[in-house]
Amino acid sequence: MQPTDQPRRSMIYRLLLENGAEFETCQDSAVAMRYPGNAAEAEQSQSMGIADLSPLPRIGFKGKDTPLWLKQQGVQLPETPNRARKQSDNCLLLRLSDDEHVLLGDLTLRSTLVATLHQSWHFQPGQMCYLVPRADTHSWFCLSGKHTSDMLAKVCGVDLRLHKFGNGEIAQTSIARINGIVVRNDLGQIPAFYLLADSASADYLWPCLMDAMDEFSGSPIGLATLQSLIARAA
Amino acid sequence: MAGANRLAEPHGLLIDRSRTIDFEFEGEAYQGFAGDTVASALAAHDAWLLSRSFKYHRPRGIFTMAGQDSNCMVTVNGDANVLGDVEKISPGLRVFGQNYKGSLRKDRRARIGRFSRFLPVGFYYKTFFKPKGAWEKRWAPIIRNIAGLGQIDTEAVPAYYDKQYKFCDLMIVGGGPAGLSAAKTAADAGAEVLLVDENEALGGALNYARFAVSSDAARDQRGEMVAALSAAQHVEVMTDAICNGWFSDNWLPVIKGRRLYKVRAREVVLCTGVLEQPAVFHNNDLPGVMLGSAAQRLIRLYAVRPGKRAVVLAGNNDGYAVALDLMDCGVEIAAVVELRDEPVYDDIAKAVRAKGVKVYEGHAVYRAISTSDKHHLKAVEIRQIVGQGQCGQSGERVSCDLLCMSVGYTPTYQLACQAGAKLGYEDNTAVFSISGLPESLHIAGSVNGMWDLQEVLRDGEQAARAALRRLGYEIKVPPKVVNSTVSPSFGWPIFSHPAGKEFVDYDEDLQLADIVNATREGYEDVQLVKRYSTVGMGPSQGRNSALATARLVAWATGRSVAQTGVSTARPPFAPERIAHNAGRSFYPERHTSMHHRHVEAGAQMLMAGAWWRPAYYGPSGERDRCMREESLNVRNNVGLVDVSTLGGLEVRGPDAGEFLNRMFTYAFTKQPVGRSRYVVMTNEHGVVIDDGVACRFHDEHYYVTATTGGVERVYQLMLRWKAQWRLEVDVTHVTAAWCGVNIAGPKSRQVLATLCEDVDLSAEAFPYMGVREGKVAGIPARLMRVGFVGELGYEVHVPQHYGERLWDAIMEAGAAEEIRPFGIETQRLLRLEKGHIIIGQDTDAMTHPAEVHLAWAIARKKPFFVGARSIAEIGKQPRKRKLAGFVVNDLDAPIPLESHLVLDGDKMTGRVTSCYFSPTVGKPIGLAFMTLEQAIPGSSVTIKSTGGVFVTAKVVELPFYDPENQRQDL
């Protein structure tokens, strides 16, 4: 299938096509599932790979009543800001501040938590818990492999070395001079970082990251490769 | 052959004798060993002339052999100003000297040196300013032709340079004995250590200097220390890496290869060592005259014998170590010229004397004498010292081809001083001292005034322990080490000569008299001496001249060296390439989700802030035609423009209405749900700073748009005031979350209706300024009836990732109606016809609402909004200007452009802010600030247009088009 077969499209689907991506349907979008021309995709994910997860579900909530509302929906919250917490269905809740949270869907696409929360949320007078369209404010990339920290050091001023930036930690920072949210979320034994950044800058950021990872022979990888890592870890 | 001067092992730490490398110098073939520098490989072949000096084109050769001088600057493969004493040879390397006309050996411009007495410091300032105009026409072309360091290769292909952050607990700058000791101490404690050294091999002076009578002592010590560090955990070693500055909070740039590392260190220990200093005497720049440490580097690092018959000028015992090294490799020592009249000899010096070397105590080298071609040292004249800087009337001539100077040192204080350290000077020891360091910065070793090797090692450990304590390690910090040895610096190794050429600054060919004369011209402060004479401003940045300059300025002005000081040491420490700063620079760009559709449609794209936007669709040379066709299609048919770059802010909460009431000039608490309202934001001074619309979707929910360039400021102001007012409101920046189009024109409703099933688009159900939520082409959307371009129109906002699909759907739906996209240039024309202003284009930093027809947008009954008080006060003052519309009836006149002046006779009274040819009106129309008298409709004003042509414009009522608003209210 082609990404243009779906109404919702990653901002960088053209770049992914240029890299030979093969797409599969993901709700009303298309996600780069694999790169058939890259025989070493699996090894790449353990060395230095980048995947575009922008078509995957995610949602944000903001406002002082947000923690309470999320708890009422059965969501497990991290205890402190700038921490992420995995949910029972493998979704990942990011606590950006006391009253701002982002929920990232699971990479296996089995979870329905994002959709459930979306449906449960209604604008209610006096309740300061507001939906934030994080699926559109930010593109979502996954960087994986042992060289990821070194690569990120070329575009980010935060110390993201593995022994300094633990699994589940969040940095809200600048990536290649645009605002971004970096979340460490290892895939089993493989170091991995999620990168959420301005969706309108995705066309700019993706080549920046590709350039930075060139030194480590990095290349794009598909969601299927990440899913296999998760399966192996399980 | 790798050279007749090549020494046997164990000399040659850095060379690999198993690999020979062929290269060229000045077109001649040479061979060296892998690991050789250009200078060492040439020296091995007895080729000592490397380059020419900047001003007098004097022959220059090896001087520091450490990359600390400009004498070795050569052009390598077209790359100018490469330091030949550190640049490694590689196969096929093509090297040339610099600063000559003709050939390096026969430089036609070398004769300039003969006229040096007529070219004193300040000569240029005093000479070339007259007669008037002569500088630009006559002198500048000549001087610019001669001036410059090397030749730039304008055909060079840029190489790839980049940057990387690095982090550590403790960064140690300098991998000499102190640095090695500090690194080992810190690593053993478990700290993360980054050890940076500019040299290829760790060890510092242990690599080349002689610390004992035994020649093996330093090598053995180095071997043990490097091996111990290699075995340590938590240590990262960067060699061939130079730390080029210190910035706040221990931010240190380190350059290695083509990468600039931006290091963040919690603690820093500077073990930067010392820089050996030259003596100042006649012809002290001749090839063959070099620092003692340079000769030792040639011997130990590159296995090159630096000469055949040498004189050593000693102001300390290190000179004897040099002499001993020279003797060990077969160099005849003609004499040791001992500056001190009552020296205290150490074991090494005693060993030299025991070998029968003639030592001239209390003597100086008065002058160096060149060979007939002036390319090398032939002899020196030795004279007895009879006073500070004074020699006797006669002396002894000693033949030699090598003169090694060991007369003293300065600490490598640059990084410490950049961190705020103070430089002191002790007259009795004749060395600088460093104090006043920041708490997280430590110094150790010879830079800290330690000269004995064991004390240097202990000092390194002490500094590391002090840093570890600050890092939170429970560790004992021993007392500071106290230096117990005699200073190795001789107080006044400066001897004038009637013929001059006693060079203080080799980079700029500055002689002793130049420095003294600068003070006599009234430039007594060392900073002024620097700027007037350019001392210390060359590539070596005063590393070889600062001490001598300070001494001379102090002497000439009757002050102490401590009072005189040295000029400010600013980053970078060593020359760095612009490419290192430019490499991997990030210039963020933003694309709307419809961006590629614009490009595919042939749009000419322009940047608005970080956004790329379509200006118009069509060839770049046909702007006017494209705009005309696009605008007429909107007026008569239907057009589509991408408005995704407009700022979007969700304002939600019980106090959302009150919040907007305070943020904007209009009233919002009673704004009905389902309606939008124009918003104007003013700052505390009553100046218009942004506009947009506020769409009310719920009692507690407004969707506020802002200008493309202004939304970040609006958002920041909202957050600031929200915090101050403590209202129950949340503000979320959603610009990137929504994309949008404006479908405009009389057929816009017709086209949109085919895509929109759940919203009644009729004029009655969805009136002008109404807002609705529904679906367009199956995509969840926010719809707004707007009239920015003066036609029936709808803004459709959808989630960003659906933007391309929305664009395609509308273009397909409108194909039958011949819909076509229009760019923002056309949009600006259309809104101008309608008399709508653009904030930032039709306003400036002083514009208040009444000047730009926005008085209606101010709710005067509100108790407060930001800027209300100022607007009220401004309103009491007589107005001085107004934004008025004008038309140009003369179709042959050049169309005025933005910022063209509005005149009243000879007086400037305003400026044009917008002007286009309007296909609808049939003539150029525009907006301009002018006086109230000029702004009366029907009056004429003069505009100074392109080419200085005065154009008569007629002031008219706004808008230019559809004054009854019948088109947008359809």
Image (cartoon, grey):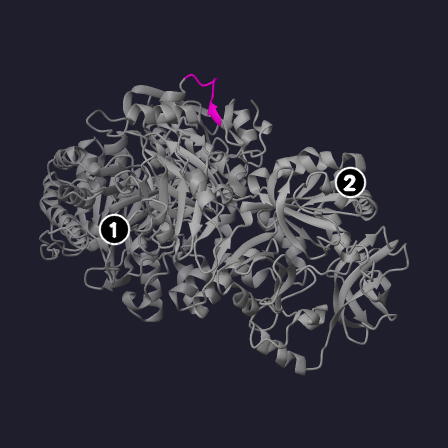
Magenta stretch: dominant secondary structure: loop
Residue at image location 77% in from the left, 57% down from the top: B832
**SS at mark 2 in the image:** helix
- In front: label 2 or label 1: 2
Numbered range of the magenta stretch: A32-39
Disc 1 crowd rating (10 Å Cα; few below 14, some 14-19, many 20+) is many
In the picture of the structure, the residue carrying the numbered disc 1 is: B268
Callout 1: chain? B
Tell me where residue B884 appears, x and y as whole percent. Answer: 78, 67
Callout 2: chain? B
Residue A35 lies within the magenta run: yes
In the picture of the structure, the residue carrying the numbered disc 2 is: B621
User: A28 or B55: which is nearer to us?
Assistant: A28
**SS at mark 1 in the image:** strand
Is residue B144 toward the left or the right of residue A41 in the image? right
Tell me where residue B543 appears, x and y as whole percent. Answer: 34, 51
